[in-house]
Structures are given as structure tokens and as C-alpha cells.
Image: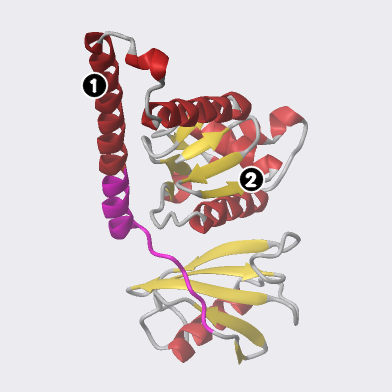
Amino acid sequence: MLFFTDSGLIRLGDKEVLLSRQSKICLTFLCEHAGEIISKERLQDACWKQYGTVVSENTVRQTLFRLRKSLASLGVVEDILETQGYAGYRLRPDYIIVVPNTHEFRLMEQRSTIETAKENIHPDTHSLQQPLSAVKPIVSKSKLITCILFLFCLFFATGAYLRSQQFIHPLHYSEAVNQDGHTFYISNYVKNNNAELMSRVNYWLIKMKIKTTQNSKIYINSDHGNSINLFVCNGDIEADNSYCESMAVIGRNHP
């Protein structure tokens, strides 16, 4: 995958997507520190505070959510941007190739295409006058380079595909379900009884005095054992102006 840091363009194969300014800043910083665990505070300082903006952790989460969504639109099914619990985030190394100049890269592509086309054209009269020994090494070298590039791309694509089948788990939510005055969306990774889960969530929303309105929407992402992971949003989770809080209900300590 190629990331053009000057324009914010991401390319994978023949697919491209243009990131927003803030997503571009975040991905650039994460690429510079690929493989490292970046805390939320460090990400806030590097991508917002140094530009004169102070934001909440929710803004950071939503920016990374949109970044993941942009990667998914290219067909990336592996979670290359990992959430490391309370420690922060980690961009998996060796997945994204950083290209600093979009214009120069496109010029190189055009030159490569032209050179390849020239090699496939039958030689003219002047070329036929050249010694055969001078032509053969050029053709052999060109074929060798092309073969190496092809094998490299094939190896990279195969590895990326195999890894993607192991790590990525896309979320799909159910239709809206109303219970006790709240609107719920249940992901495909929820295994337990939905009615019981919604009852537990409602109990803790009231107990923890989480403010909700008629427009609030609750997204239950997963349940592992007796734990529930969810978002409480004041609108659709994908809306630019929505505000979401992440919650984890641990244990079954409720009536």
C-alpha cells in the first residue's frame, strides 16, 4: 500500500482514496513511528496540540475510526492499525510504503510505462544496424528487473492477503432495536442473548448516570464471557458531528 504524505492519497492496486487533512496528519505520524505503541496523549500532542488545537480523546477515536474506514474502502481487511487497550495505538510495520512526493512518483510511473512500451516495439532500421551483442544484454537486464519486480509484488500481495484473513474482523450492525427507551445496534460478534445484554447495558447506563436522549444510539460491539464492549453516541456513529463514548461492562453484577 502506498501513502502519499503530501496529498494524503492512499493507493492499493488500482484503488485510491483521499484522506481528510486530520487523518493525513495522524497517518503520517503513525507511519513515522510504525511498530511503536503511541499513547492517546502523545497522538493528541503531535497531531493536534502542536497545530494549536486542543481536542478530547473522543475526537482522536473518531479520527482513527474514519482512517480505518478509508483503509477498508481500499479492500484492506486486516487491522493494521491496532488498539492496544489503554496503552494507545500501534501501526503494524511493513504494510504502508510512504511516498513523499505524489507528482514525482507519477512522473516515474509514466517514464516506466513509456520505457516498457519502447522495449515492446520492433526495432527500427537504426536499431538493426547495432551489433547484436549490444542489444542482448539490455533486453536481458530489462526482463530480469521486470521478473524481480513481479515476484516481489506477488510475494507481498500473497503475504498481505494471508495476514488479512487472520486478523481483520469487520463489524456489521443489526437493524435498530428499541428497548427501555434506548436504541440499540448489535454487532455480528455478539454471541449471548441480545435481550439480556441490552438489559445489562440499560442497568449500567442508569447506575453510572450516563446522559442519553431520544437521539442517542448504543452500539454493542462484542461480548466476551461476561464483558460487553460498546459505544454510546448522540447520533449515527459514522456522522461527522456525532459524539461517542466508549464503555466496557465487566462482570454480571446487576439485578
Residue 165, quarter of the rendered image: bottom left
Q: How far across and down, in percent of the image, does residue 39 sit?
A: 51, 38
Task: Give the residues drawn in magenta, as a range.
Answer: 157-174
Q: Which residue sits at x=28%, y=43%?
A: 154
Badge 1 is on which residue?
140
Residue 109 lies, in percent from the top left, at 50, 30
- In three-dimensional space, the C-alpha distance between marks 2 and 1, rounded to whole angstroms, equals 41 Å
Q: Mark 1 Cα within 10 Å, few/some/many (few <14, many 20+)?
A: few
**Residue 165 falls inside the magenta stretch:** yes
Disc 2 residue type?
Answer: Leu
Magenta span: chief secondary structure: helix
At a point 48% along the width and 37% down the height, the residue shown is 2
Vertical side of 21 occupied by 138: above or below:
above
Looking at marks 2 and 1 on the same chain, the residue that comes earlier in the sequence is marked by: 2
Q: Amino acid at mark 1?
A: Ser
The quadrant the N terminus occupies is top left
> Could you tell me residue 57's position as x and y percent?
63, 49
Nearer mark to the viewer, of 2 and 1: 1
Residue marked by disc 2: 19
Left or right: 224 in relation to 52: left
Q: Residue at x 44, y 25 (%)?
A: 115
Provide the secondary structure element on which disc 1 rests.
helix
Work out whether residue 162 can be spotted: yes
Image side of residue 127 versus residue 54, left or right:
left
- Based on the displayed image, in which of its 4 quarters is residue 148 positioned? top left
